[in-house]
Amino acid sequence: MAIERTFSIIKPDATRRNLTGKINAKFEEAGLKIVAQRRIQMSEAQAKKFYDVHAARPFYNDLVKFMTSGPVVVQVLEGEGAVLKNRDIMGATNPANAAPGTIRKEFAESIEANSVHGSDSLENAAIEIAYFFAGSDIVG
Ligand code: RTP
Ligand code: MG
């Protein structure tokens, strides 16, 4: 399988509980390399733009509020089949449906406060990475 890069966010519910290291350990144990990482406070404008695809969904306003409620860690993960691999490590959106051993099963608080974001396709990964990182920020 090809080496890919995917975009990841450790969400405010996880940074608040000091879980950044434990979540990063899950990525690294699965063979994903953290090739860029930055802790930021997302602005409302950034969160709105990032989740624009969900603008018509009933949870959109709450999601923007949640994602700006505290620091997040934006990351680029690299490895074989990184996009799908990361989705596997994350687990289902709703932690109630997430498989044992996944990040969301172990750490998520709710369907909204579900600890991590991961790109859902290679195409979206490239768009999301470029939104937060310059090429020179990424060291593979
Ligand atoms: P993500 O985009 O964050 O990696 O998660 P996902 O693909 O598993 O979930 P998606 O359907 O894209 O939804 C994006 C984020 O919106 C929040 N959400 N809240 N209250 C709700 O019913 C609800 N549904 C989704 C979650 O934070 C989800 O990760
Ligand atoms: Mg999604």
Image: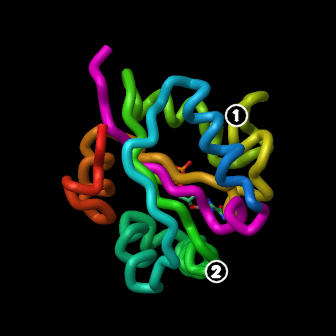
Is residue 8 shown above or below 85?
A: below
Q: Quadrant of the N terminus?
A: top left
Magenta segment includes 35:
no
Q: State which image quarter holds ligand 1.
A: bottom right
Q: Is residue 27 left or right of residue 120?
A: right
Is residue 81 shown above or below 63?
A: above
Which residue appears farthest toward the left when viewing the image? 135
What residue lies at 25% left-to-right and 43% top-to-bottom?
A: 123
Q: Which residue is mark 2?
A: 69
The span shown in magenta is 1-17
The quarter of the displayed image where residue 30 is located: top right
Magenta segment includes 8:
yes
Mark 2 Cα shell of 10 Å, populated few (<14), some (14-19), many (≥20): some
Looking at marks 2 and 1 on the same chain, the residue that comes earlier in the sequence is marked by 2
Q: Which residue is mark 1?
A: 102
Query: Tag on residue 137?
Result: none
What residue lies at 45% left-to-right and 75% top-to-bottom?
A: 47
What residue lies at 39% left-to-right and 27% top-to-bottom?
A: 79
Percent of width and height locating residue 67: 57, 73
